[in-house]
Image (cartoon, rainbow, N blue to C red):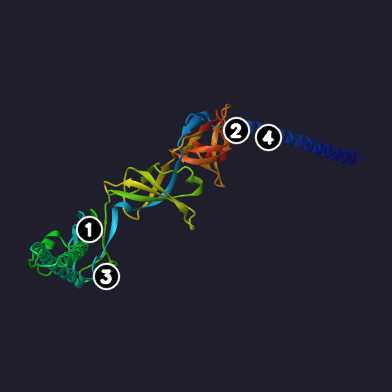
């Protein structure tokens, strides 16, 4: 009997002990949750912290209102300066007989580039010879008739007719002479024809219309040319080039004619200065960008036609706002920009911002910061890593 009582008492004591332990454990968990909640709230107000040794390597700058000129960063392509380059068309029809200059040659205006064996040219030379002889003959007749009229040997109407014929011959000669000039005949050959001298077989000459560099040779000996249609050479003065930049609608208001620009290419070590020469009145229907033409000097020949370049156009009007270095700006998982702000408590907080245009080595911040905020510059990437731990 006594053993039964002891067994029942033991079961009761064990049940009581189990209930007590359960209650104590439950209370401990409740207290722990309260403590964690209090700690998290305190951390949210003070930001997250890092050890003092690591904090000494973090560099912060105060946010202040700055006056600046926005910079529009974009891309562009290089072309020859259209005011100092031209494509040379064949002045006559016929086969090319000789190429007189190599590709890349420096030529002056009027320099001979190639010769063409052309029946049109031979006909023009023949027409000039006939016109020159006719002019001389009719001029002598008009002079002789004037002398005869003074002695009453002929009527006045005969003198007038002779003068009219001489004037018509002079007009025909001038027209033939202009034709020879248009075909590229040099002054020495024309003088020989006027002097009645034999000049032998004369070939048409393709001449440079401007001074510059022969940047394209589009013909070869024996090739048949069509007058006024076949392109033969391209001559360009490459000391200055055109850069066409693509500017989108959001940046277009900051771009004006006469604004300064910088052109950067991997072919050169230093940026090339330029001036905005024209802002197009049309928008490309495919890219929705406006073409902005920049004139850039090219004394060292770094810029080449069709080269892809990076362009920075400086706005002509000053603005005011907050600027932060590029090293301070990070991106989250959604590619949204943010910075780390240093708190007075010694911690750091992530602050989402809205970026404006690029300004030098930094960005304009449109929203998210205010005067007096301290933004982390050097060490921002380390803080992003520390925050995720």
Secondary structure, mark 4, is: helix
Name the residue rendered at 27%, 70% in the picture: 226
- According to the picture, the residue beneath numbered tag 4 turns out to be 36
Residue 291 at what x, y percent from top left? 43, 51
Name the residue rendered at 35%, 50% in the picture: 242
Q: Dot 3 surroundings within 10 Å: few (below 14), some, or many (20 or more)?
A: some
Q: Compare residues 81 and 321 and report the one nearer the observer.
A: 81
Residue 387 at what x, y percent from top left? 56, 38
Alpha carbons under labels 1 and 2: distance apart: 73 Å
Q: Quadrant of the C terminus?
A: top right
Seen in the picture, residue 12 relative to 232 is either above or below; the reply is above
- According to the picture, the residue beneath numbered tag 2 turns out to be 47
Q: Compare residues 19 and 145 and report the one nearer the observer.
A: 145
Q: Dot 2 surroundings within 10 Å: few (below 14), some, or many (20 or more)?
A: many
- According to the picture, the residue beneath numbered tag 3 turns out to be 226
Residue 352 at what x, y percent from top left? 57, 39
- According to the picture, the residue beneath numbered tag 1 turns out to be 208
| Mark sitting earlier along the chain (1/4) | 4
Give the residue at the far right of this rendering: 1
């Amino acid at each position: 009997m006594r053993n039964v009582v002891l067994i029942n008492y033991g079961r009761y004591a064990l049940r009581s002990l189990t209930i007590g332990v359960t209650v104590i454990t439950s209370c401990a968990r409740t207290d722990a949750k309260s403590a964690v909640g209090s700690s998290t709230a305190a951390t949210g107000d003070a930001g997250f912290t890092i050890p003092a040794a690591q904090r000494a390597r973090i560099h912060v700058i105060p946010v202040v209102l700055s006056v600046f000129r926005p910079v529009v960063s974009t891309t562009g392509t290089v072309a020859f300066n259209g005011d100092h380059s031209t494509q040379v068309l064949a002045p006559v029809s016929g086969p090319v007989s000789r190429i007189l200059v190599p590709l890349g040659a420096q030529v002056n205006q009027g320099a001979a580039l190639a010769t063409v064996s052309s029946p049109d040219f031979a006909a023009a030379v023949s027409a000039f010879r006939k016109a020159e002889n006719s002019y001389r003959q009719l001029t002598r007749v008009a002079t002789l008739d004037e002398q005869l009229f003074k002695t009453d040997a002929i009527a006045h109407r005969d003198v007038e007719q002779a003068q009219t014929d001489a004037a018509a011959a002079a007009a025909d000669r001038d027209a033939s002479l202009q034709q020879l000039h248009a075909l590229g005949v040099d002054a020495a050959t024309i003088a020989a024809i006027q002097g009645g001298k034999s000049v032998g077989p004369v070939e048409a000459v393709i001449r440079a219309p401007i001074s510059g560099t022969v940047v394209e040779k589009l013909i070869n000996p024996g090739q048949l040319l069509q007058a006024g249609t076949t392109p033969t050479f391209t001559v360009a003065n490459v000391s200055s080039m055109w850069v066409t930049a693509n500017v989108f609608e959001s940046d277009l208001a900051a771009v004006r004619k006469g604004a300064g620009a910088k052109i950067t290419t991997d072919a050169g070590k230093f940026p090339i200065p330029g001036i905005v020469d024209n802002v197009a009145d049309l928008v490309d229907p495919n890219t929705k960008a406006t073409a902005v033409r920049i004139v850039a000097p090219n004394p060292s020949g770094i810029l080449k036609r069709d080269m892809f370049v990076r362009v920075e156009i400086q706005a002509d009007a000053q603005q005011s706002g907050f600027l932060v270095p590029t090293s301070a700006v990070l991106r989250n998982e959604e590619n949204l920009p943010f910075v780390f702000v240093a708190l007075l408590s010694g911690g750091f907080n992530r602050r989402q911002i809205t970026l404006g245009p690029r300004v030098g080595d930094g960005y304009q911040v449109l929203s998210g910061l205010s005067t007096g905020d301290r933004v982390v510059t050097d060490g921002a990437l380390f803080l992003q890593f520390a925050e995720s731990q």
